[in-house]
Image: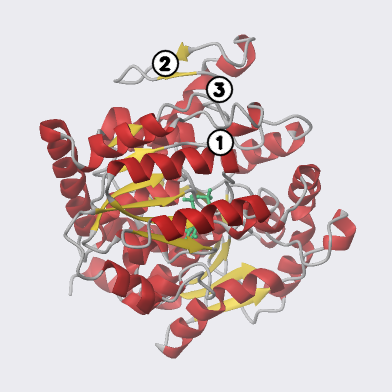
């Protein structure tokens, strides 16, 4: 073993990482995976959460403990009452009324006190905090306790670089009309956006303070950890590193950590809307690449008008499909319509109500394409599975993630959504008609030479993703480098390591 490897192993064995995700599925899931990856390298990890969210992470944490990993789930109280939230409203997907998003985000910093108490009660100081970008309050914790802090970026690096360029060129301030189209400056490709499709997190009315704190927490961090891989968006990662002048470690796709059916199935939530055996039975025996999988993540809700168009579009393709319809989307009308639709399509369609084991489905050979809202986890999970996409962004970073998939990677076709759903009326939200759904699904799943090339590109990217995560691959090495860097930094700051 080389001296460098020896040093690295020593760092890995002595380090203690404190991982702090935002309480939303799209943030908790990749950060729990990151925590597991660190624990697999021998690090001790405290994964910070709250009681309601701990139930969703428990299966993964128990499995980790069972296999001897040093991963501990740390439950801090979430101050629902102080925040004016109903009891137990500890996750974005539990928020029932839009006017509660503000209080939820504004009260997150109340977790700082309990986290400091927990860390002070440890026999020795931890190596570092890896904080979700949406948890800027960890800045004060790391400052008070003199612990290094790294920021975990949820979305694609492409999203982060594009929004950074817009900030640097003052386009958020100087473009007056939200819907006016303009080009993101200084990119190798022409990427057209408007202020609504290139919106940053917290660039929302009455959230200015939080936006400023996120910027400050980024500026004062010791570097960025990305759920991406170097070979996926090389120019964008290199340029981002250069632009921020800090260390940047792409360590993903983190979902590739899950190799067994069991761990794929419980990822994010122990209570799936369907058990893994039934899904696998349904997929088994279907031809390779013959099924389209439709799911729009953990937050986006599709209304009946739009569900109907998707349903008729799918029927018209004649293809087999697995379709995730969220419980939150269900009312009596939806239930009735979905029930009839299910009966008509019993022999070629599986509708899953509630939480679906997404990675389990995506990685099944029968799945040929993924209709996705382009939440970054979903898009990257499709990349990792080598599956092309039908892209249907709903809000936030999803629009820029779509641009990356469709215009840069060319492994997807968009259904043509131009505006975040929040800015449309209920009728306007049913923007994509059945003919369009049918046409785009066919282009990706069947579509002659164009479709074949797209599927080939997707497959090749999937191969690259797998290699990046293997021993010696770029993401594997980046994680080693992060562990070594954090440990060295902590030692320099006089943090006594365990
Ligand atoms: N997910 C899942 N089952 C579901 C819905 C979502 O496993 O029924 C997972 C999905 O695999 C991804 C995450 O939840 O890891 C959603 O994150 P993403 O960034 O794609 O979208 P968001 O939910 O944040 O909009």
Check the image and name the residue furthest to the left: 449
Chain-order first, disc 3 or disc 2: 3
Label 2 CA crowd tier, 10 Å (few <14, some 14–19, many 20+)? some
| Cβ at disc 1 under 8 Å from ligand 1 | yes
| Cβ at disc 2 under 8 Å from ligand 1 | no
Judging by the rendered image, the residue that carries numbered circle 3 is 167
Q: Is residue 15 left or right of residue 259?
A: right
Q: Which percent across, then down, holds residue 418?
A: 49, 24
Q: Which percent across, then down, holds residue 282?
A: 31, 70
Q: Is residue 252 above or below residue 399?
A: below
Helix, strand or loop status at disc 1 = loop
Quarter of the picture holding the N terminus:
bottom left
The label nearer to you, 1 versus 2, is 1
The label nearer to you, 3 versus 1, is 1
Q: Which percent across, then down, holds residue 245?
A: 44, 35
Label 3 CA crowd tier, 10 Å (few <14, some 14–19, many 20+)? few
Helix, strand or loop status at disc 2 = loop
User: Which residue shows up at 26% across the image and 35% down it?
Assistant: 409
Q: Is residue 218 above or below residue 490?
A: above
Residue 496 in view (yes/no): no
Label 1 CA crowd tier, 10 Å (few <14, some 14–19, many 20+)? many
Quadrant of residue 77 within the rendered picture: bottom right
Judging by the rendered image, the residue that carries numbered circle 1 is 396
Judging by the rendered image, the residue that carries numbered circle 2 is 185
Chain-order first, disc 3 or disc 1: 3
State the separation of the CA atoms marked 3 and 2: 11 Å
Q: Which percent across, then down, holds residue 383?
A: 29, 49
The residue lying toward the viewer, choosing from 308 and 159, is 308
User: Which residue shows up at 75% across the image and 46% down it?
Assistant: 101
């Amino acid at each position: 073993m080389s001296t460098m490897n020896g040093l690295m192993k020593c760092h890995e064995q002595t380090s203690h990482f404190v991982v702090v995700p935002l309480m939303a599925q799209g943030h908790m899931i990749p950060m729990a995976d990151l925590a597991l990856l660190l624990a697999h390298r021998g690090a001790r990890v405290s994964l910070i959460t709250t009681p309601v969210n701990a139930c969703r992470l428990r299966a993964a944490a128990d499995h980790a403990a069972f296999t001897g990993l040093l991963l501990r789930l740390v439950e801090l109280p979430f101050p629902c009452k102080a925040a004016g939230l109903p009891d137990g409203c500890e996750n974005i997907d539990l928020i029932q009324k839009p006017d509660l998003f503000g209080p939820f985000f504004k009260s997150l910093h109340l977790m700082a006190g309990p986290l400091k108490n927990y860390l002070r009660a440890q026999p020795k100081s931890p190596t570092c905090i890896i904080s979700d970008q949406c948890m800027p309050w960890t800045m004060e914790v790391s400052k008070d306790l003199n612990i290094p802090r790294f920021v975990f970026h949820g979305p694609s690096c492409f999203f982060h670089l594009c929004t950074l360029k817009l900030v640097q060129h003052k386009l958020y301030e100087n473009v007056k009309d939200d819907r006016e189209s303009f080009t993101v400056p200084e990119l190798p490709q022409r990427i057209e956006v408007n202020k609504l499709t290139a919106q940053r997190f917290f660039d929302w009315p009455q959230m200015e303070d939080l936006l400023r704190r996120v910027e400050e927490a980024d500026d004062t961090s010791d570097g960025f950890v990305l759920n991406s891989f170097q070979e996926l968006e090389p120019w964008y990662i290199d340029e981002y590193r250069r632009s921020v002048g800090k260390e940047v470690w792409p360590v993903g796709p983190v979902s590739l950590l899950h190799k067994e059916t069991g761990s794929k199935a419980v990822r994010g939530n122990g209570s799936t809307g369907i058990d893994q055996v039934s899904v696998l039975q349904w997929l088994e025996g279907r031809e390779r690449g013959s099924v389209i999988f439709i799911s729009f993540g953990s937050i986006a809700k599709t209304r009946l008008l739009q569900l109907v168009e998707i349903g008729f579009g799918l029927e018209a393709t004649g293809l087999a499909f697995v379709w995730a319809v969220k419980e939150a989307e269900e009312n009596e009308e939806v239930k009735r319509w979905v029930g009839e639709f299910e009966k008509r399509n019993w022999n070629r369609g599986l509708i899953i109500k509630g939480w679906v084991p997404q990675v389990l489905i995506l990685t099944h050979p029968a799945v040929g394409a993924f209709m996705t809202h382009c939440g970054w986890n979903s898009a990257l999970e499709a990349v990792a599975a080598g599956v092309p996409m039908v892209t249907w962004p709903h809000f936030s970073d999803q629009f820029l993630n779509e641009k990356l998939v469709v215009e840069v990677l060319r492994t997807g076709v968009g259904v043509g959504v131009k505006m975040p759903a929040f800015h449309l009326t209920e009728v306007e939200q049913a923007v994509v008609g059945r003919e369009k759904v049918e046409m785009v699904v066919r282009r990706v799943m069947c579509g002659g030479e164009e479709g074949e090339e797209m599927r080939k590109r997707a497959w090749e990217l999937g191969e690259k993703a797998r290699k990046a995560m293997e021993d010696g691959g770029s993401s594997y090495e980046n994680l080693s480098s992060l562990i070594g860097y954090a440990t060295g930094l902590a030692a320099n700051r006089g943090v006594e390591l365990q």
